[in-house]
Amino acid sequence: MMRLKISASFFCLLFVLFAGVSVKAQGVIVPIPCDFRPCRPIPRPRPIPLPNALPVKSIELDTKINGQVATTHVEQVFRNDTPYTLEGTYFFPIPETASIVEFAIWENGKKLVGEVRSKEEARRIYDEIVRRQKDPGLLEYAGKDLFQASIFPIPPNSDKKLELTYTQVLKAESGTVAYRYPLGTGRNLRTNQNRLIEDSVNRRNLPPQQIGTVSGKIEIVGKEALRNIYSPSHQIDVKRKGETGASVSFETNGNDNDFQLFYGLSNNDFGLSLLTYREAGKDGYFLLQLSPKEDLSERELVNKDIVFVLDTSGSMAEEGKMEKARSALLFGIRTLREGDRFNVINFAGEEHLMESNLIAANGAGKKRGEDFVGKLTPTGGTNINDSLVAALKQFSPSPRPKMLVFMTDGLPTVGESNVERIVANVNKAKAEDIRLFTFGVGYDVNTALLDKLAAENSGAADYVEPKEDLEIKVSNFFTKVSAPVLSDLQLDFGAVETDFVYPRKITDLFKGAQITLIGRYKNDNDLQNITLRLTGKSGTENRSFNYQNLDFPRRAED
């Protein structure tokens, strides 16, 4: 028998079937009541009950994905806030196809790495160690997707740090690869040996496991170009590393939703990824995403027309809102490309145009815009209706993508103030297909108006509180829409019967961005190897793309 001795501590690692366990959780440590296993002499009755599971102080996730092979390394710090030395059972669910690489416990600043042993040998060693009150780390296979480790001792009022590394092969369906890290609270914990009973008298009404800070970093290297990196569960930050690489990070506090990440693999100019869900006998649901390749040449980008409309009413002088809006607008002008055209309109009681028509975004044009914006001062009321109508008249028929960016901090106080009539006037004045983006600054904005304007004109509404940085939020928007690559998009689903597809109109596609469509499909039979057809315009050129071998199954509940 081989043993690992570090200082006076010892622990071993094994895989052993442990029937009857049910848990869906990130790693949890569940204290074992001394009613079932002697721990150490403690006066009875206990003055406080044991927790259902030890609080998680922090979780740090570090994952490397190469193609479809993921290596996950997680560090978890648990907190024993009781005055007792505890023995606990560490539960961790992993994918069915995963393999444990390493399990380790930190004690007194030292990392103690476990060993793999047979079921019978590991159980015998563990029981012997518990009797001697040494520190084992026994990792056991406890079901097809669950491992467990026995941890002892867990000192009172202290932290316990554990590390686990495992590898897995990620599933890929219809061009989409899925990665999941479990963060559920694990409330259904039981064993057929009654060593742990959740609904015991001491623990029946205790709250579920507490989770502290959760942070993660996922490095992806694809065999093909990466497309549509997306998380439905967490807000993520994505940094691209060329066509085939990306770094994804996230950080939350108290969020116990499983972390989910999806990404597409495609060498097409415009990648498409598809996710489906369908219960037996019901309509199916799909989520479809489109994204362009990263390395686009200047020739592949589309020139655009854009009009900036800025509220310069008197209230913009408060809380530095005018200076923030000015900085954001200057950034927007500077991000314009050589072939773009633009104009600036400021409004208070009435509107003022920088130029009577759109001008080229060349060096002289940008200088004109910067000078105009730099001289704006806040004064007067807020005439939203007339300023929007004047802005829409700037656009003339052309194949260019057209955008109107509207920033305001208040309610309409001059001219038309009825929301429905303002929206109707905007729709009447809009002869072209124009996307309208609205930014509300402060607490006094008419959110109903801004939301409706954006929703009915293929745009988006965003809001900035006075203490937030308007420049950062608006600058991020300008960066996103600075380079259109495909407009006038249409998607043909072929033999797939779709329903309730949202958004009803597919918006323009920009470099570094992605488009998401959700909807239902109704076919009674399995649809396999389906081809979808995407068409659009790149400038004046019509383009089309076929996406083959896609599946819309009759049942898909994974």
Image (cartoon, rainbow, N blue to C red):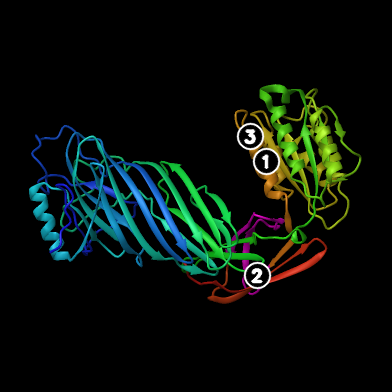
Q: Residue at x 48, y 47 (%)?
A: 250
Q: Residue at x 86, y 42 (%)?
A: 364
The part of the image, by quadrant, that contains residue 334 is top right
Q: Quadrant of the C terminus?
A: bottom left
Q: Going from the N terminus, do you reach mark 3 or mark 2 first?
A: 3
The range drawn in magenta is 492-520
Measured Cα–Cα span from mark 1 to mark 2: 36 Å
Mark 3 vs mark 1: in front: 1
- Left or right, 418 with reference to 447: right
Asked if residue 171 can be seen in this view, the reply is yes
Q: Which residue is mark 2?
A: 493
Inspect the image, locate mark 3, and give the three-letter code of the amino acid beneath it: Val
Inspect the image, locate mark 2, and give the three-letter code of the amino acid beneath it: Phe
Q: Quadrant of the N terminus?
A: bottom left
Q: Is residue 104 above or below residue 451?
A: below
Residue 516, image x, y percentages: 61, 57
- Left or right, 496 with reference to 249: right
The part of the image, by quadrant, that contains residue 534 is bottom right
Q: Secondary structure at mark 2?
A: loop
Asked if residue 231 can be seen in this view, the reply is no
User: Dot 1: few (<14), some (14–19), or many (≥20) neighbours within 10 Å?
Assistant: some
| Closer to the camera in the image, 95 or 482 | 482
Residue 299, image x, y percentages: 77, 61
Residue 464's disc is 3
| Residue that lies at the very extreme toward the right in this rendered image | 356
Q: Going from the N terminus, do you reach mark 1 or mark 2 first?
A: 1
Residue 116, image x, y percentages: 22, 63
Residue 475's disc is 1
Residue 495, image x, y percentages: 63, 74
Q: Does the stretch in magenta take in 496?
A: yes
Q: Residue at x 35, y 51 (%)?
A: 26
